[in-house]
Image (cartoon, rainbow, N blue to C red):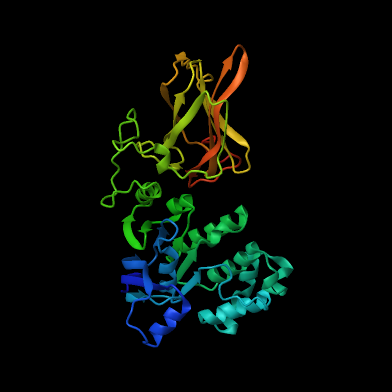
Amino acid sequence: MEDYAIRVADVTKLYKLYNKPSDRLKESLKLTRKKNYQEHYALRNVSIDIRRGETVGIIGTNGSGKSTLLKIITGVLNQTSGDVQVNGRISALLELGAGFNGEYTGIENVYLNGTMIGFTREEIDERLEDILEFADIGDFVYQPVKTYSSGMFVRLAFAVAINIDPEILIVDEALSVGDVFFQAKCFHKFEEFKKQGKTIVFVSHDLGSVNKYCDRVILLNRGVKRAEGDPKEMIDLYKKIMVNQDDGEDTQDTAAPEEEEPEDDTGVLWKSRMVENPSCSRYGTGEADIIDYCIMDAKGNITNMISKGDTFTIRMKVRFHQDIRGPIMAYTIRDRHGTEITGTNTMYEGLDLGLVKKGSTRVVSFTQKMELKGGEYLVCLGCTGFVNGKFDVYCRLYEVCVLQNISDKNIVGYYDMESRVKVKEG
């Protein structure tokens, strides 16, 4: 155990879901032998070993058991079965302001949390200046925390968690709150902790940060440990799970050749394997319809997630209900505020589709390299054209799906110029 900070062996967490409160009471009083509940396994036989000094990420879809696992490791929850061993002092940030008393001021909560972790008042006194400097919330530290914004909450909570000299730091999605400067400060602290040989375990949907900072990644799916290993491999497998393409057996990509269509003998639509926007806006004259679409990574997998620097393809299938000469296929990428960032169409690319007959279909693929800033974007698709000099929209889908760019590099603005930097003495 000396080489390990955390060891989790065959941990299971079972919840009993009762139809009504009286069923729970009857069972507790042993008034019935009838099973009046459903069993829900938040975790099932999960085993992980985390060595001292490792930075380990835990990823998975919502409901996969990530937060439950962290709560069991930190003692917030008890497992139904299995064993957990922790070797070292843990500082955990599992929920915003967990353990904070809303009536207490920020300062009072610093002492409250520090005492709960096991520090004396004198030890907290020594660290107070560092905590307040890191939190950087000004005079609000003298106000009750119930008046704080969520951003202030996480600043103070995180400042306490990382400035009380933990041997093991556990963080659950806390960095999704706070501005980019505070997040950068936190990750600088991560790097400092790594150099000091401390152990970090964190759950995050920010796959760029997972890829950049983690030595290893554990992938959970429906309460079961699906796999663990290299961050990029686990992120690739996670992308398959997100669109129901995981075979459940191995982590190797079985990619189709680049020119092969991403479809199977069952006739399943490509878009059924995408994360679609339920509020997508569709309009047009109806002379043509976009009947299917997808985003594909460089290996031919249908996915909403693309790694920065990789080649990817936006593909759509259009059915024509009238003869149309020179239809124009297009895509646009917008940010979440609706600002158009980039895009192109077959006309701009010098591709003339000629006369397309009624009843026929065309599949158009746009392949390009992902050079946008990491983050989430929205994809729009269109089929348009000119009739007697008049521009017509046959079919347009606004913000039909999300395109997530996974990047471990920050830039200013939207586009990475891939600058090469040299510094020498003048």
The answer to whether 316 is drawn above or below residue 208 in the figure is: above
Q: Residue furthest top?
A: 388
Left or right: where does residue 400 sit relative to residue 88? right
Determine the image quadrant of residue 305. top left
Query: Is any part of residue 424 visible from this angle?
Result: no
Which residue is depicted at the point 72% across and 73% down?
143
Q: Residue at x 38, y 50 (%)?
A: 238
Position of the N terminus, as image quadrant, is: bottom left
- Find residue 154 and report its horizontal and vertical position in percent: 60, 65
| Left or right of 21 in this view: 284 | right
Residue nearest the observer in this picture, 392 or 185 = 392
Location of the C terminus (image quadrant): top right
Q: Nearer the viewer, residue 275 or 16?
A: 16
Question: Can you give x and y, in whole percent of width and height, for residue 2 in the image?
Answer: 32, 74
Q: Position of residue 68 (x, y in %)?
A: 43, 68
Q: Residue at x 43, y 42 (%)?
A: 274
Closer to the camera, 405 or 133? 405
Q: Is residue 380 left or right of residue 136?
A: left
Provide residue 108's location: percent of width, then percent of height.
Answer: 65, 79
Q: Is residue 65 visible?
A: yes
- Quarter of the image where one finds residue 54: bottom left
Q: How many marks?
A: 0
Left or right placement of residue 195 versus residue 10 in this view:
right
